[in-house]
Image (cartoon, rainbow, N blue to C red):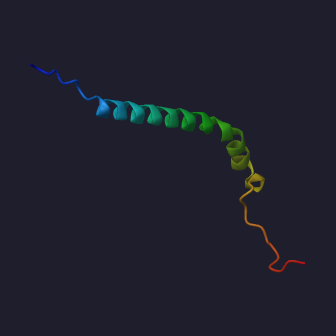
Amino acid sequence: MEQNQEKDNFWLYIGGVIIAVMTVLMMVKGSEHDKYVTAQKAISEDSANSAYRAVNVPSGRE
């Protein structure tokens, strides 16, 4: 009696999942890039438009 062993596709499935996750991450990163173009232009024109500029903050709270 001869048994035929079925091929194990575990690593093929793992590779497919990794490729799918990387593809989704690259698509999300690419779509987020255009989101901040307007803000970047405004900051480059006038750095006072930036929310990250240094501001004198009082040390004590009242």
Q: Position of residue 41 (x, y in %)?
A: 69, 42
Residue at x 82%, y 76% (from the top left corner): 58
Residue 16 drawn above or below residue 33: above
Left or right: where does residue 55 sit relative to residue 3? right
Q: Observer-nearest residue: 33 or 10?
A: 10
Q: In which quarter of the view is residue 42 placed?
A: top right
Residue at x 23%, y 25% (from the top left corner): 7
Q: How many marks?
A: 0
Residue at x 41%, y 33% (from the top left corner): 17
Left or right: where does residue 49 sit relative to residue 40? right
- Assign the C terminus to one quadrant of the image: bottom right
Query: In the orientation shown, which residue stands out farthest toward the bottom?
Result: 60
Left or right: where does residue 20 sit relative to residue 31? left
Query: In the orientation shown, which residue stands out farthest toward the left?
Result: 1
Left or right: where does residue 3 sit relative to residue 22? left
Q: Position of residue 48 (x, y in %)?
A: 77, 56
Q: Observer-nearest residue: 23 or 57?
A: 23
